[in-house]
């Protein structure tokens, strides 16, 4: 069986009842056919390359010269048919590599975007926290200033109150001493009170 890339693409496998997938034996048989055909193509290509190299180097025997045009013409189709399978596999590999590269590039782009978004969000959170912190510190400073002002007022009130209380008590004591001396009795300080 001459296997072509189209055969590989269009190959249909029968579904197995009661479970998902294809018949493993059928798939294995088909893969065995692919391997055999591929090996034949590779061997033919190597043989054609060797004949071509021998022909180009002039190492072809003189007796084979009349027959040389026919074998040279024959390997050309063999090279083309043999090159079809490796070319197809090279194309599949190239396609797979390109898809891989695209997925890797897309993944890197997404990674970079996620990192940039996370950094922006972190910067926003930090900025917001710093702003809140400054506002709270300013609020606490205002409250502290208010409380310090109130404490100063209370200290002044206490000082004034003590001063007034002392003046009042001293005045009352003087009045008491003065009334006691004018009434003729002994001063309170003399009694020992």
Image (spheres, rainbow, N blue to C red):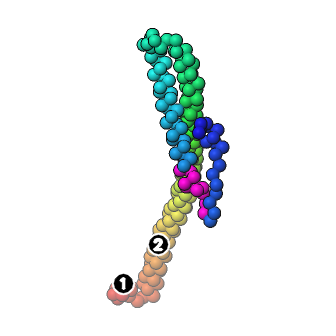
Residue annotated with mark 2? 162
Which residue sits at x=55%, y=36%?
Answer: 89
Q: Which mark is residue 189?
A: 1
49 or 107: nearer the viewer? 49
Residue 154 locus on image (x, y percent): 51, 68
54 or 134: nearer the viewer? 54
Q: Residues within 10 Å of mark 1 (few under 14, many from 20)?
A: few
Which residue sits at x=53%, y=19%?
Answer: 71
Q: Is residue 53 magenta?
A: no
The reply to whether residue 62 is in sight is: yes
Q: Looking at the picture, does residue 71 appear above or below residue 175? A: above
The kind of secondary structure element at disc 1 is helix
Q: Looking at the picture, does residue 187 appear above or below residue 148? A: below
Which corner quadrant holds the N terminus? top right
Residue 30 locus on image (x, y percent): 56, 47
The kind of secondary structure element at disc 2 is helix
Residue 177 locus on image (x, y percent): 43, 82
Residue 133 is left or right of residue 15, and the answer is left
Q: Which residues are magenta?
A: 19-28
The reply to whether residue 123 is in sight is: no
123 or 176: nearer the viewer? 123
Q: Looking at the picture, does residue 74 appear above or below residue 23? A: above
- Count all numbered tags in the image, as a single digit: 2
Q: Earlier in the sequence, mark 1 or mark 2?
A: 2
Q: Nearer the viewer, mark 1 or mark 2?
A: 2
Residue 26 locus on image (x, y percent): 57, 52
Which residue sits at x=54%, y=41%?
Answer: 34
User: To which quarter of the image does residue 86 belong?
Assistant: top right
Q: Is residue 24 magenta?
A: yes
Which residue sits at x=49%, y=36%?
Answer: 39
142 or 154: nearer the viewer? 142
Q: Residues within 10 Å of mark 2 (few under 14, many from 20)?
A: few
């Amino acid at each position: 069986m001459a296997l072509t890339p189209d055969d590989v693409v269009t190959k249909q496998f029968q579904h197995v009842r009661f479970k998902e997938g294809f018949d493993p034996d059928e798939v294995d048989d088909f893969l065995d056919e692919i391997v055999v055909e591929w090996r034949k193509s590779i061997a033919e290509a190597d043989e054609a390359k060797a004949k071509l190299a021998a022909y180009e180097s002039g190492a072809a025997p003189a007796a084979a010269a009349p027959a040389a045009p026919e074998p040279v013409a024959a390997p050309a189709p063999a090279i083309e048919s043999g090159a079809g399978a490796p070319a197809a596999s090279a194309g599949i590999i190239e396609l797979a590599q390109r898809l891989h590269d695209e997925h890797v590039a897309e993944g890197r782009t997404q990674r970079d975007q996620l990192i940039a978004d996370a950094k922006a969000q972190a910067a926003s959170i930090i900025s917001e926290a710093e702003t809140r912190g400054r506002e709270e510190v300013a609020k606490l400073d205002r409250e502290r200033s208010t409380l310090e002002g109130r404490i100063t007022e209370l200290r002044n009130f206490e000082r004034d109150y003590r001063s007034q209380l002392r003046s009042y008590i001293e005045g009352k004591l003087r009045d008491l001493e003065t009334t006691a001396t004018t009434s003729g009795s002994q001063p309170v300080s003399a009694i020992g009170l």
